[in-house]
């Protein structure tokens, strides 16, 4: 497995981890009964750590399809190179570090770490063009 594909697998595992992490933290606000029920009512407006974990998960899910697509296109097209490997690494590590940085509300580090991940995604995309 190439470096880029390894980071892609890591990002997918990370997304599953974030689903469980956000769900666990949300139960502190909406309760186990609501969380295991039919959810016929709207969820509460999550605040604090729960709200940050919900937003961090949503943020990952906004960029993950583009990352998956770019890495797979690079692989299928035979365009994987150092830029795709570095880009995939920056994306993965940026997204991983983003979780605790956002959880603890570390401003402006949250935006800086997000930017590193986006630079990684951009590197993968750019590697397809050149």
Image (cartoon, rainbow, N blue to C red):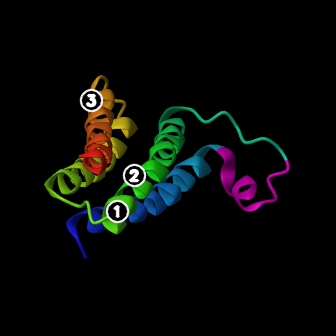
Residue 93's spot in the image, x, y percent? 25, 50
Residue 38 falls left or right of residue 108: right
Region rendered in magenta: 30-40
Asked whether disc 2 touches disc 3, contact meaning CB atoms under 8 Å apart, the reply is no
Q: Which residue is mark 3?
A: 112
Q: Which residue is mark 2?
A: 67
Q: Closer to the camera: disc 3 or disc 1?
A: 1
Q: Answer with mark 2 or mark 3, whichever residue precedes in sequence.
A: 2
Q: Answer with mark 3 or mark 1, whichever residue precedes in sequence.
A: 1
- Pick whichever, 57 or 101, lies toward us: 57
- Pick whichever, 27 or 93, lies toward us: 93
Asked whether disc 3 touches disc 1, contact meaning CB atoms under 8 Å apart, the reply is no
Q: Secondary structure at mark 1?
A: helix
Residue 75's spot in the image, x, y percent? 32, 66
C-alpha gap between disc 2 and disc 3: 19 Å
C-alpha gap between disc 2 and disc 1: 8 Å
Question: In the rendered structure, does residue 75 fall within the stretch colored magenta?
Answer: no
Residue shown at 58% from the left, 47% from the top: 26
Tell me if mark 2 has few (under 14), some (14-19) or many (20+) residues whose alpha carbon lies within 10 angstroms of its own: many
Q: Closer to the camera: disc 2 or disc 3?
A: 2
Vertical comparison of 113 with 125: above or below: above
Q: Secondary structure at mark 2?
A: helix
Q: Which mark is residue 8?
A: 1
Residue shown at 29% from the left, 32% from the top: 115
């Amino acid at each position: 497995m190439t470096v880029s594909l390894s980071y892609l697998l890591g990002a997918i595992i990370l997304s599953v981890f974030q689903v469980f992490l956000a769900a666990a933290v949300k139960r502190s606000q909406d309760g186990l009964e609501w969380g295991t029920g039919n959810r016929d009512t709207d969820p509460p407006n999550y605040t604090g750590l729960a709200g940050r974990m919900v937003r961090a998960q949503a943020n990952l899910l906004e960029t993950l399809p583009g990352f998956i697509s770019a890495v797979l296109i690079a692989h299928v097209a035979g365009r994987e190179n150092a830029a795709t490997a570095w880009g995939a690494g920056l994306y993965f590590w940026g997204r991983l570090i983003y979780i605790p940085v956002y959880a603890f509300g570390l401003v402006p580090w949250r935006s800086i770490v997000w930017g590193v991940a986006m630079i990684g995604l951009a590197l993968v995309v750019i590697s397809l063009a050149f």
